[in-house]
Image (spheres, helix red, strand yellow):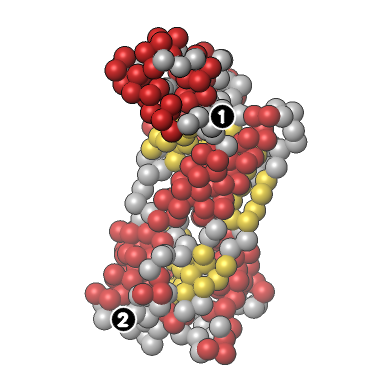
Amino acid sequence: MTDVARAAGVSVSTVSHVVNGTRLVAPKTREQVHRAMRLLGYEHHPIARSLAAGSNQTIGLAITAASNPYWVELIQGIDGEATRAGLNVIIVDTRDDARHEASTVANLLAHHIEGLVIAPAVGWRELTLPLLRDHPVPYVIVDRIDPDLRVDQVGVENEASTAAVVDHLISLGHTRIGMVAGIAGLSTSAERLRGYRLAHQRAELPVDPSLVLDGSSTSEGGRKAALALLDLPDPPTAVFAANNNMTIGALAALKAAGVRVPRDLAVAAFDDFAWADLFSPGLTTVAQPSAAIGARAVQLLLRRMTDPDAPPQTVRLPAEIMHRESCGCTPAHR
């Protein structure tokens, strides 16, 4: 800063105010400082400055980067809240693979992050969790809540939301409702399956195991599961897909098979799309508050970073059912 001040013909304190934004500086003077910095080859690196102060003001985000609009909106919520708090975010792709997740988290820890937001992969308890226990870095679980862990966690009301949308299908007269379920071992998959069963229990309907098929949380899995449901001797009259990737695959399969939605088969899904109401027919979905979940995760992390001894919190945010035409309901049911 002394070199820059001399070259710009201003005081060192003025250079400091320009670089750190701690006080208003006249535009002409500010430009003099920036010109001097460019001439001398100096750049402002907030991370380097914070390292010198013993803090890098950076948190990590370990999450699958699968092409899923839900994850995109979640990341936007996390990044927006972190930015408002003056934090940098390093995002790593876990690929939903426990070994790769452990490797990427170890790399984040080696970069001395101050906190971590993680959406755990199946098998994370054996590989990633021990890493976090060995390093005193605050972390928050997002989306995939683990009820057996006493740590900060935030996600949506999966069970209640699924039960509500399946209740709606039952209220429309459907007694054979197929379910395309997500990856086994994920808490979100288990909770949505419990919601499906809960709705049947409340309506005193038996659950036919042949109507619940694994869609592996992928579009290809959703396509195969939908075709298998159509091939049953007594096929369902409605289908619930437990995430948006599987929904896309299921809809593609139904179209290829000449099935008309909702005339031949009603469809509802977990996860809303920005373009769900542009489908023909419009898609009935459970809409998660994705950005709000991400923002709340950062808020919990900031609380943990400030107060390491604070009692852990598990936050469940409500979802909203977006009633459209694919479930076959009349305006009176919406």
Q: Residue 5's mark?
A: none
From what the image shows, is residue 217 above or below residue 197?
above
Residue under numbered circle 2: 259
Nearer-N-terminus badge (1/2):
1
Place residue 298 in its image quadrant.
top right
Q: Is residue 330 left or right of residue 306?
A: left
Q: CA distance from mark 1 to mark 2?
A: 65 Å
Near-viewer residue (236 or 152): 152
The answer to whether any part of residue 191 appears in the image is no
From what the image shows, is residue 201 above or below residue 47?
below
- Crowding at mark 2 (Cα within 10 Å: few <14, some 14-19, many 20+): some
Report the number of discs.
2
Residue at (44, 60) in percent of width and height: 243
Residue at (59, 76) in percent of width and height: 167
Element type where label 2 sits in the image: loop
Residue at (67, 32) in percent of width and height: 304
Residue pushed farthest left? 256
Residue at (35, 19) in percent of width and height: 37
Q: x%, y% of residue 234?
A: 41, 80
Location of the C terminus (image quadrant): bottom right
Q: x%, y% of residue 330?
A: 51, 89
From what the image shows, is residue 59 above or below residue 42?
below
Residue under numbered circle 1: 23
Q: Amino acid at mark 2?
A: Val
Near-viewer residue (303 or 138): 303
Q: x%, y% of residue 249?
A: 32, 64
From what the image shows, is residue 84 above or below residue 315?
above
Q: x%, y% of residue 310?
A: 74, 33
- Crowding at mark 1 (Cα within 10 Å: few <14, some 14-19, many 20+): few
